[in-house]
Image: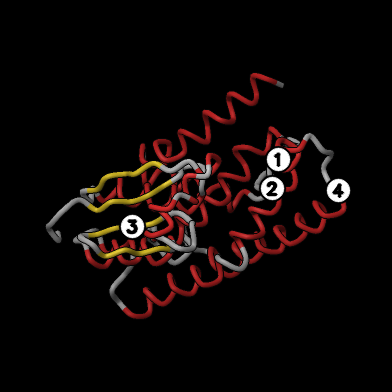
């Protein structure tokens, strides 16, 4: 394993990509320090953080003075630089290309489509007290449904994980997105977007089993928010 100072990561664990980075660091035991950020308090807009990342977004990684943004880049950098199990980001070109294929697709499909349903059905009504815009929500659900179809037919097919027989960083990114949608959905309309999708349910269970306690540790803040809001209903 590469040596040196601790890897520092700036994370808000209410962010799906931040949770993916947190899970990888925990599972691989890469020495690291988490700098907790609260986006809801505007901590990403401070002068010091803006100097670190002018885009004012998390996650951000600092490794011995090397600053890197974007979860996809951070996950792959960590899996490449540090001596972690190869399955996270395989060295074999074809297997690595499958991971790159999914992560490229993820950022214009799974991520925006799952996030939009969550925003329209849970976040905006909670923040503004307004009613759900049913027309916009139905369009968002249609987009998400198409994405879930492709996850099953193109990526999972007859294999246990998105890119083959072993878990990779691609599974972390996808599982964190869909867990956000499923875990907090009871605060909205009570919809479970995976309810009629046993193949995706089994895949998500395999991901959680593969990473063990790291999954619940990364999602603890999300679960606590869900439980507090449920108590108020």
* Residue at image point 58% right, 50% down: 178
In this rendering, the label closer to the viewer, 2 or 3:
3
- Identify the residue under disc 3: 61
> Picture coordinates of residue 140 (x, y %)?
76, 57
Decide which of tag 4 and tag 2 comes sooner along the chain: 2
- Please name the residue that numbered disc 1 is placed on: 122
> Which residue is at the far bottom?
93
Tell me residue 215's x, y (percent): 41, 41
Secondary structure found at label 1: helix
Label 4 with label 2: CB-CB less than 8 Å:
no
Check disc 2 and report its element: helix, strand or loop: helix
Gap in angstroms between the C-alphas marked 1 and 3: 30 Å
Q: Which residue is mark 4?
A: 134
> How far is the residue under mark 1 from the one under mark 4?
12 Å
Q: Position of residue 198 (x, y in %)?
A: 62, 48
In the displayed structure image, the side of residue 92 where residue 107 appears, left or right:
right
Q: Earlier in the sequence, mark 4 or mark 3?
A: 3
| Quadrant in which the C terminus appears | top right
Mark 2 and mark 1 in contact (Cβ < 8 Å)?
yes
Disc on the earlier residue, 1 or 3: 3
Residue on which disc 2 sits = 119
Most distant residue in the left direction:
3
Q: How is the image coloured?
A: secondary structure
How packed is label 4: few (under 14 Cα within 10 Å), some, or many (20 or more)? Answer: few
Identify the residue at horizontal 35%, vertical 66% (top origin): 76
Taking 19 as reference, is 110 above or below it? below
Left or right: residue 172 versus residue 232 is: left
Badge 1 density bin: few <14, some 14–19, many ≥20, Cα 10 Å = many
Circle 2 crowding by C-alpha within 10 Å: few under 14, some 14–19, many from 20: some
Q: Nearer the viewer, mark 4 or mark 3?
A: 3
**Quadrant of residue 226 in the image?**
top right
Decide: few, some or many residues near mark 3? Use Cα within 10 Å; few <14, some 14-19, many ≥20. many
């Amino acid at each position: 394993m590469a040596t040196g100072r601790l890897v520092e990561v700036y994370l808000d664990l209410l962010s799906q990509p931040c949770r993916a980075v947190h899970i990888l660091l925990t599972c691989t035991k890469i020495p690291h320090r988490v700098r907790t950020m609260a986006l809801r308090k505007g901590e990403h807009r401070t002068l010091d953080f803006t100097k670190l990342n002018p885009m004012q977004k998390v996650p951000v990684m600092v490794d011995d003075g090397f600053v890197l943004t974007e979860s996809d880049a951070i996950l792959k950098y960590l899996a490449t630089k540090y001596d972690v199990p190869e399955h996270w980001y395989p060295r074999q070109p074809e297997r690595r290309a499958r991971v790159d294929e999914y992560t490229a697709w993820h950022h214009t499909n799974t991520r925006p489509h799952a996030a939009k349903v969550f925003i329209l059905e849970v976040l905006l009504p909670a923040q503004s007290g307004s009613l759900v815009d049913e027309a916009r929500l139905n369009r968002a659900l249609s987009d998400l449904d198409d994405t879930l179809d492709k996850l099953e037919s193109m990526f999972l097919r007859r294999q246990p994980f998105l890119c083959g027989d072993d878990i990779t960083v691609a599974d972390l990114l996808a599982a964190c997105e869909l867990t956000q949608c499923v875990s907090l959905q009871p605060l909205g309309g009570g919809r479970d977007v995976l309810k009629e999708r046993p193949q995706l349910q089994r895949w998500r269970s395999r991901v959680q089993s593969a990473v063990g306690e790291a999954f619940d540790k990364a999602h603890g803040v999300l679960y606590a928010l869900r439980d507090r809001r449920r108590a108020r209903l």
